[in-house]
Image (tube, rainbow, N blue to C red):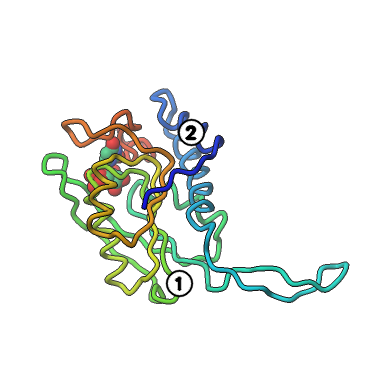
Amino acid sequence: MLRIPDNSLLRHKLARLRDRRTDSAAFRRLLAEIGAILTAEALADLPEAPVAFETPVQPMRAPMLASPEPCLVAVLRAGLGLLEGARAILPEAPVGHLGLVRDEHTLVASEYVVRLPRDLAERGALVLDPMLATGGSAAQAVARVKAAGATGVRFACVVAAPEGVARLRGEHPDVPVIAAALDERLDARGYIVPGLGDAGDRCFGTE
Ligand code: PRP
Ligand code: URA
């Protein structure tokens, strides 16, 4: 299931992110801001339970999250940009890191680091990667997180290509996908069109 939030602030920040004139420092800042918005949108339907407490004025009951906050899993490198914003609104969530890099000729992703929290099963996980292109990296990341015991996995990205959405849906039909935009297609090099270029390079100034 793909959901694109109807959020004008998100669209505004995405347009600035896409603009080739946006330099690396601004790109990183925007990615973090988008990460906060996407995280809030992706987790807006987490189960709640009523809790009793007192305000300075009187006792009351109000809903709070029924389970511990989900774990945040950043797909390196570009997912680190989204993670910064996600952590601003979920500062107590444990964080996992998955290092994946896509071969520029075969477009197949290979794994170079896996560091995941132990209590994934009790929490669920939100996997963060700005780009869903062929879907190879996302499908591999979600499989890794599931193999580590996570149930209730969600995937958040900034720009999705139809090809990546189809692949993720085919391999992980249980995983909701939230994206800031669904773009047109992939080009011959596997880049999303119109896209925003190489997210990792723009985020870390390695263009
Ligand atoms: C980018 C991006 C995704 C992947 C998407 O990472 O951040 O992880 O490509 O492509 P896919 O859907 O075709 O697998 P990249 O491999 O370029 O690594 P980087 O973040 O270190 O630059
Ligand atoms: N990875 C990126 O960083 N950008 C794309 O357009 C596709 C994959």
For ligand 1, give the image quadrant: top left
Q: Which residue is mark 1?
A: 123
Name the quadrant containing residue 62. Answer: bottom right
Estimate the x, y position of residue 136 in percent, counting from the top left: 21, 51
Estimate the x, y position of residue 181 in percent, counting from the top left: 40, 38
On residue 93, the disc is none
Callout 1: helix, strand or loop?
A: helix
**Ligand 2 lies under 8 Å from the Cβ of mark 2:** no
Disc 1 residue type?
Arg
- Specify the farthest residue to the left: 106
Near-viewer residue (182 or 83): 182
- Specify the farthest residue to the right: 57
Residue appearing at x 39%, y 72% in the figure: 120
Disc 2 residue type?
Ala
Q: Is residue 196 above or below residue 73?
A: above
Estimate the x, y position of residue 139 in percent, counting from the top left: 25, 56
Given contact means CB atoms under 8 Å apart, are the residues at marks 1 and 2 in contact? Answer: no
- Specify the farthest residue to the top: 21
Q: Which residue is mark 2?
A: 26
Residue appearing at x 26%, y 45% in the figure: 164
Label 1 or label 2, whichever comes before in sequence order: 2
Quick check: 57 left or right of 32? right
Q: CA gap, disc 1 to disc 2?
A: 33 Å
Q: Is residue 162 above or below residue 60?
A: above
**Ligand 1 lies under 8 Å from the Cβ of mark 1:** no
Callout 2: helix, strand or loop?
A: helix
Residue appearing at x 66%, y 68% in the figure: 63
Estimate the x, y position of residue 42 in percent, counting from the top left: 48, 54
Residue appearing at x 51%, y 51% in the figure: 41
